[in-house]
Amino acid sequence: MAATKTYTSQLLVHLKLALNLGKKRGKVSQVEMDQYEEAMQGLPSLVQKVLDTVPPSVKALADELASARHIFFMGRGINTATAFEGRLKMLEISYIPATAYSAGESKHGPIALIEKGVPVVFVVPNDDTRKTMIGNIMEIKARQGRVITFGEEGDRELKELSDAYIEMPPMNPFVTPVAYAVPMQLMAYYTALKKGLDPDKPRNLAKSVTVQRRLENSLLLQSSTILRNICPISSGFTVSLSLGLLAVER
């Protein structure tokens, strides 16, 4: 079966690690530390709110995506890996070919495949990537792609630019990778059901090292990005550290 809770729980471990490293290196103040800790403590109720409000919109979206030939996922910053998580789940349980990119790389390949009606899923929380993500959305719209956006509720500009808009509750940008992963996973789940597939028994997958390695790749990307943003150190060190942590978990 596809890994869902393992992804979000291990992501929280890496968020906590990044915070503690940032504090020890003097990059995160105690005030910021308290704010981030408060945001993480509020995640259970936040995710529950997502589960209570998002499913109807995601179900309607799944009816459309079930017939898609290919789906693109795009994100920026710490939510680049959230886009990769959405793509991975869509591949694993709905068997729809999907591609995920950092939105900053959209002009280096994926945009050549965008034509009328091609669904492109954007992860756009209310953070410092929002403005540049809007630019990416407009590029896709100009090529008649179908824009599907996961963004904060009440964001009128984003909603008007999107063909489908999934509203997320307001939250600290630091915890968006966890909260935004949940509706992405649900989207894949409902798409699989619409196609008459069993999401609990995806073909060719086993709960084994094979699945673990795919999860590691996504978590490695996520943790490296978080560490660089909160605790600026070399990319090589963050990759080595993340690999070491994953090895210890085994």
Image: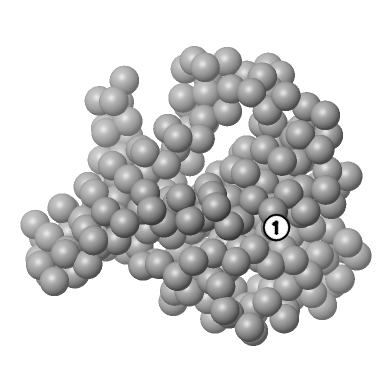
The quadrant holding residue 134 is: bottom right
* Figure check: 82 above or below 35: above
Residue 11 at least partly seen: yes
* Residue 212 pos. (x, y %): 46, 24
* Residue 221 pos. (x, y %): 44, 46
Q: Residue at x 83, y 48 (%)?
A: 63
* Residue 42 pos. (x, y %): 31, 56
Direction from residue 125 to residue 225 in the image, left or right: left
* Figure check: 9 above or below 37: above
Q: Give amino acid for label 1.
A: Ser
Q: Residue at x 48, y 41 (%)?
A: 218
| Element type where label 1 sits in the image | helix
- Pointer 1 local density, CA inside 10 Å: few below 14, some 14–19, many at least 20: some
Q: How many marks?
A: 1
The quadrant holding residue 241 is: top left
* Figure check: 229 above or below 92: below
